[in-house]
Amino acid sequence: MRFFKDFFLLNEISEETILYHRSEEALEPGQILIPTKKHGESHWLKKIFTERVLEKFRQKYAPDKLSRFNCIFCSVVPRSVFLGKGQLYEVKPIGNFYATMAYYINAIGRTFDNVSYSAMSEYIGEPPFRDRYRNDEEYLEAIKKYEIEQNSYRWFNNYDDLLHLFNLYWNTNVSESILELGREELKEQFTPEKLRAHRLKTDPKWIEVLCEKVQVVRKVEEEMSPILFKRGDRVVLLKDIENNFYGYTADGNTKLPEEEVQKIVKSFNGVPSKYNDYTLKIPEGTQGVIVKALLDVPSARGYKISGGYQRPMKYRFLRMQPDGYNFGIDLGAQQYKEHIRNLVKKV
């Protein structure tokens, strides 16, 4: 396994390098961007267990590097893994910055989830069901406890591989156990076991630069195909689809109140699942707005090369928020059944 320092582009970045930053806010040339209050205590990354432990790892073993909770995220190419996160701007870094590989964050998430659900269920039991509790308070407390037990099981079954990925992300060489970092979060103990390793990806779209602040150079105008979508596009469903609903807001970061969850379930004929979610039936003609659109990087013709031949471009993620409701319809999974042009169109 090579550390990312072997990827030369990471070592060529300076304060004169043109980087790329996406924002849903309108920015002006010369404007200085710094992390705002929304990147503080309420930063959405802090809701993710592995992000919290990764930050504690940084504080202990790489304190000279910028926190993911307090930085401006940039890329070295326009069509990067941040595609779909707003309008594109050229920027220059100011002050401290740190270049690394966003791929490792994805790998950390996959490694953390790399458990046998049947084994986990046997160890910590089935998830709570609402009808077993006297009120919502007891039910929500049981859900919270169950989520902690899930995180405990995942962390202590995968911590060796997670340590390896933490080292890769921060370009450190820590060999001691990081179990205490997770135990501090979870107050639980499980027997760890070594799972799989991950290969380094060297596509420049994966490079992310954590910047203390940046200066806007100019807005980049992007050409979009008529069948491509970006945040803010109004769309309509062209057919009935089924969609899993876990009770979260359209941004996926906040749990909805139970009464609002039940309103959505009733409106879309939801059927409960044993995994504490619902299957909603979204009817043809439902209108809404795109709230997330993350694409595979396409060629100019809307095709990508795979295995020596051309395949139609696929959406990895496309989320629509229906009018009048605060939840997301995930179209990304649906498009693997048929082309996206048959599922939704702009209005």
Image (cartoon, helix red, strand yellow):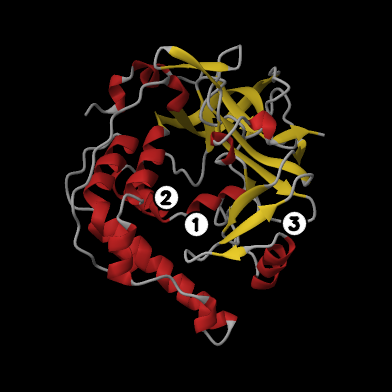
Q: Is residue 184 left or right of residue 208?
A: left
Give the distance between the C-alpha atoms of the residues marked 2 and 3, in whole angstroms: 29 Å
The kind of secondary structure element at disc 2 is helix
Q: Any mark on residue 47, and which? A: 1
Quarter of the image where one finds residue 307: top left
Which quarter shows the N terminus? top left
Q: Is residue 185 visible?
A: no
| Residue at x 41% of width, y 54% of height | 52
Q: Amino acid at mark 3?
A: Tyr
Select label 2 or label 3 by which is in front: 3
Q: Is residue 48 left or right of residue 314?
A: left
* Residue 51, disc: 2
- Mark closest to the chain's N terminus, 2 or 3: 2
Q: Quadrant of the C terminus?
A: top right
Residue 69, given in percent of the width and then of the height, sits at: 49, 47
Residue situated in front as seen by the camera: 337 or 41 = 337
Q: Is residue 288 left or right of residue 62?
A: right
Mark 1 to mark 3 CA distance (whole Å): 23 Å
Q: Say if mark 1 contacts mark 2, CB within 8 Å.
A: yes
